[in-house]
Image (cartoon, rainbow, N blue to C red):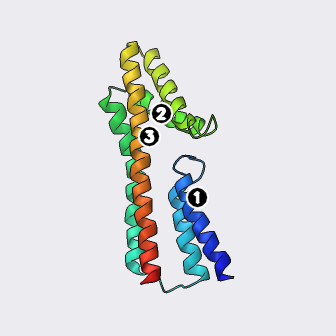
Amino acid sequence: MSVLIWILIAVCFVLGFVGLVVPVLPSVVMVWVGAGLYHWLISSDSLTWWTWSSFIVLTILIVLADHLANTYFVRKFGGTRLGAAAAAIGVMIGCFVIPPLGLIIVPFLLVTAVELLQGKTFNNALEVGLGTVLAFLGSSLSKAVMQLIMVVIFIIDVVV
C-alpha cells in the first residue's frame, strides 16, 4: 500500500511542474497535496515545522512571483493596466489553444492587439507583447525553482 501512496506523491509532484505550463492544474497546490498525502497516509510526525513553514513562505513567494513578474515586465515595456489584464486573460485562453505554446502566443497576440487598440504604435505594442512573453517565462522559471526547492526540502525531511 505504501508503494501506491509513494507513486501518488510522485505523481502530485510531477503534476505540480506540469501545472507551470498548463495553468488549469494548480501547480503549487499539487506539491502541497503530495506532502499532505505523506503526512496523512504514511507518517504524521516526520515532516517538521521547518518544512511546513518553508512551504508556506515559498508558496507566498510563488504567488507573488507570478503577479510581480507580469506587472513588472508589462510596465517595463510600456504596457497599460488593460494590457496586463489582457496578458492574464491570454494565459487562461492560451492553455486551451495549442498547449503549451498557446501560453506564449495567445497572450502575446492579445496584449499586442489591446495595446494597438489603445493607440500605441505597432512597434510599441510589439514591445509590450514581448514583455508579456518575458513575464511568463520569468515567472515560470522562478516558480519552477521554488517548487523544486519545496520538493527537495520534502525529500530531505523524509530521508533525514
Residue plotted at (38% across, 43% down): 138
Residue that badge 3 annotates? 136
Cα separation between marks 1 and 2: 24 Å
Q: Is residue 83 above or below residue 52?
A: above
When asked about the image quadrant of residue 7, the answer is: bottom right
Q: Position of residue 15 (x, y in %)?
A: 58, 58
Question: Which element type, helix, strand or loop, lies under badge 3?
Answer: helix
Q: Within 10 angstroms of label 3, few (less than 14), some, or many (20 or more) residues?
A: many
The alpha-carbon separation of the residues under discs 3 and 2 comes to 9 Å
Specify whether residue 47 is in view.
Answer: no
Say what amino acid the circle numbered 1 marks.
Leu
Residue carrying label 2: 87
| Amino acid type, label 3 | Phe
Relative height, residue 78 to residue 95 (above, below): above
Q: Residue at x 40, y 57 (%)?
A: 145
Q: Disc 2 marks which amino acid?
A: Ala
Element assignment for label 1? helix
Residue drawn where x is 43% and y is 79% of the image: 157
Q: Closer to the N terminus: mark 1 or mark 3?
A: 1
Determine the image quadrant of residue 9. Answer: bottom right
**Residue 43, can we see it?**
yes
Disc 3, disc 2: CB below 8 Å? yes
Mark 1 vs mark 2, foreground winner is 1
- In the picture, measured across the screen, residue 90 lies left or right of residue 7, that is left
**Measuring 44% from the left and 16% from the top, which residue is drawn there?**
116
Q: Which residue is mark 1?
A: 15
